[in-house]
Image (cartoon, rainbow, N blue to C red):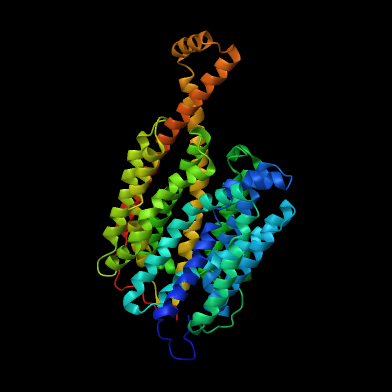
Amino acid sequence: MTTTDVAEPQPLTGLALFGGVLCLAMANFLAILDTTIANVSVANIAGSLGTSTSQGTYVITSYAVAEAISVPLTGWLSRRFGSVRVFVTCLIMFGVFSALCGMATSMTMLVACRVFLGLSGGPMMPLSQTLMIRIFPKDKSHAAIGIWSMTTLVAPIMGPILGGVLCDQFSWPYIFYFKVPFAILAGLACWKIIGGFETKAVKAAIDKMGLLLLVVWVGALQIMLDEGKDHDWFASTRITVLAIVALIGFISFLIWELTERNPIVDLRVFRHRGFSASMLTLSLGFGAFFGITVITPLWLQIYMGYTATESGYATATMGIIAVFIAPAIAAAVSKFDPRPFVFFGVLWLGLWTWLRASNNMDMTFWQISMPMFFQGIGMPLFFVPLTAIALGCVKPAEMDSAAGLFNFIRTLSGAFATSMVNTAWENETTYVHSELSGLTDRVGVAAQQMQASGMTHEQTLNSLNWMLQQQSSMIATNQIFMWIAAIFAIGAFAIWLSPKPLHAVDPGASH
């Protein structure tokens, strides 16, 4: 990034710093919240707009695809138009398109608005990260990383809770309406408070081919991941074609961007070994974390009889400790080598996932939620120092590009995890159910006892089948947790591929 024409602005202090932090944290929270807030309301939205539930999932897919495309463009947008200008514009557009989503009268209109909402929300995440670092005094930059990381970790957990409450107590449009005042007011306040931190815009030709290839391969991959389970994956011609398009598009994108003089996505930041290693750990660790946050509410709602709101409360306990210790972890990371923190944090998440692999159908709410409460200790230990490593090993001019790619890989890891965990869980449940069904002697005894109590033959079969399905899902859930624990372990050791960071994140680095 080129320097501004004026002297580098002084870091904010006092009330101005508090206001700037509040607005930037709000923007990051809203953008990430939108990735999960509509998940529990798909059925309500589809029914209200007169479409099937399978079509309703495009409400989620459209946002995810658009966000995944716009996130890695953050570096180029910042260079071309100025980082503060891009951030404020995206934040206000986010508020406007949230309102339009709530006013949608058809699924087509809603999906179109969700696309623009994703395009607006994508750059907000990395820019809130770099601007947060920029407005803090240099010796307090660790606090900026802590606050940003805290909102990044808590937002996806809060999404289903807020979505469930707003949908149950009011109606589905309110999951979009409630964000409007926060987004617009935060955008206007940011322009007023952090306008002095604007970077100089440099006119440069847009890398049209790079943009086209990015849209093609990311769009094909995201749609493949979202629809694969419903179309039986590669047994479907549609999914196979999408996979081929994504692979060819990705390879072409890599070749083009690495040879283009002014690439739309600066992939050259991967030449830094610390950045590459931290991205490997991020993809494994965050993918595994997202996997357990996807499978837990599904299991609770489908087989344990929890409502969407109740399952949200159970999983939200994982974020309680993270809120309080993230700033303290950030302070410690600024003084010591961050790699042991990441290693211990990811291993801690893996250990508790392994312990949770002994769950059973008789567990109470607190027996389910308390292990997740303690598991949450590992989240800031993993995410806060990893952010410091990733941004601390790139050149100052590469900060926005690195932040964009950091958030892009985090988003893509979540998409992969959601798709893989859903498919593996259903397949494993089906397999275990077929194995348990072979225990005909025990089932026969149970059936006789149930019919003796007055149940009809059909009622007996349905009841026994449901009991088998519940136990099958429980065994499958525990199996998935074991696999996820192993992925956490691999991710923990991957951080040692990174050299020790030579410098802390510089709050003025994006200039």
Q: Residue 169, relative to residue 507: is it above or below?
A: above
x 50%, y 61%: residue: 408
> Residue, x 24% and y 67% (percent of image)?
336
What x and y, as percent, mark residue 204? Answer: 59, 80
Residue 260 picture location, percent across and down: 54, 72
Q: Is residue 115 left or right of residue 153?
A: right
The spot of residue 451 in percent (x, y) is 53, 10
The correct choice, above or below, for 206 with respect to 245 in the image is below
Is residue 108 found left or right of 57 in the rendered image? right
Q: Is residue 201 above or below residue 57?
A: below
Asked if residue 391 can be seen in this view, the reply is no
**Residue 153 vs residue 406, the one in the foreground:** 153
Left or right: residue 412 versus residue 393 is right
Looking at the image, which residue sits at the far bottom? 6
Location of the C terminus (image quadrant): bottom left
Above or below, comparing residue 408 to residue 8 in the picture: above
The one nearer the camera, 101 or 426, is 101
Looking at the image, the residue that sits furthest to the left is 336
The residue at the point 53 percent across, 21 percent down is 465
In the rendered structure, the answer to whether residue 327 lies left or right of residue 251 reads left
